[in-house]
Amino acid sequence: MVDVFEEVEEQLRTERYLNLAKRAAPWVGGLIAVVVVVVGGGWGWTAWQDSRADKASITLNKASEALQQRDEAGAFAKYGDVAKSGTGAYKTLALLNQAAMRSEAGATDEAVKLFDQAAKAAPNPMMADFASLRAVYTLLDTAPTADLEKRIATLSGDKRPFRMQAKEALAFLRLRDGKFKEARNEFVVLQQNFDATDGMRERAKAAVSMIDSGGAATMAKAAKMAAELPPPSAMQLPPGMQLPPEAGGAPQ
């Protein structure tokens, strides 16, 4: 009798398992389909991104060629194409070049807008802060002190990649505003800072000398123009990516 009960229970258990399997089958199949789509989609997304990067690189080179041929309108348009369709570093480089061109043309507001866009699009802090620093130097002659101080403060933190350049910009700002005592203090700090470049220390020394001699009022603009801005080639780009030839030096 016990054997009969066990056999019946086993049949019932098997039937429950089969029913459970039948109910679960659509879900299992759906899950497998999702996995396939996700994995396949991931591969497709990567291939699409690579394709966009290749196209952006080619267009950047064409923009550089147009610029060398003095076709500024064509170069600006090509940089714009990369800025619209490119990703990461390529988009940032395109916006930086557009901003530099507008800065050269004296279109300060547009240049700063493009520099700010480049900073937002940047794939790493190095490129973001470089773009923001370019905006600061573009504004240094004309922008209100409070606006520049806010921008400079963001770049001056201990771990920011261009903090020394930002500190130098602050010294120039004090000089521009006629705050010669404060400017002198900033330049002295730069002079004594081991993280400052040789060029920074030399300019700081010259600035202190000019302030002490009473000739500082005429040197602010010249000093700002001589300030060092690191070339884009010093930036940290994604692994395996190289900058196009035209990005080997900082746009002027």
Image: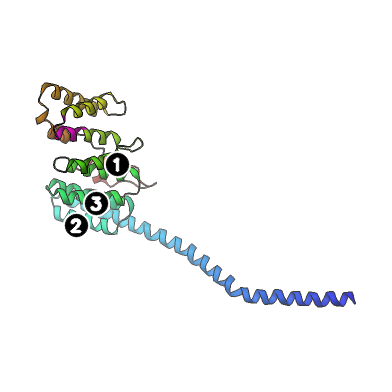
Q: Earlier in the sequence, mark 2 or mark 3?
A: 2
Q: Residue 179's quadrant in the figure?
A: top left
In the rendered image, which residue does mark 1 sit on? Answer: 154
What residue is rendered at 35% in x and 35% in y? Answer: 158
Q: Does residue 64 appear in the picture of this structure?
A: no
Residue type marked 2: Ala
**Residue 83 versus residue 37 in the image, above or below:** above
- Residue type at mark 3 is Leu
Q: Tag on residue 226?
A: none
User: Which mark sits nearer the N-terminus, 1 or 2?
Assistant: 2
Distance from label 1 to label 3 (Cα)?
A: 21 Å
Q: Which quadrant would residue 23 be assigned to in this image?
A: bottom right
Pointer 2: what residue?
Answer: 77
Magenta stretch, residue numbers: 171-179
* SS type, badge 2: helix
**Image location of residue 108, percent across then percent down:** 15, 48
The N terminus lies in which quarter of the figure? Answer: bottom right
For label 1, count other residues whose C-alpha is less than 10 Å away and answer few (under 14), some (14-19) or many (20+). Answer: some
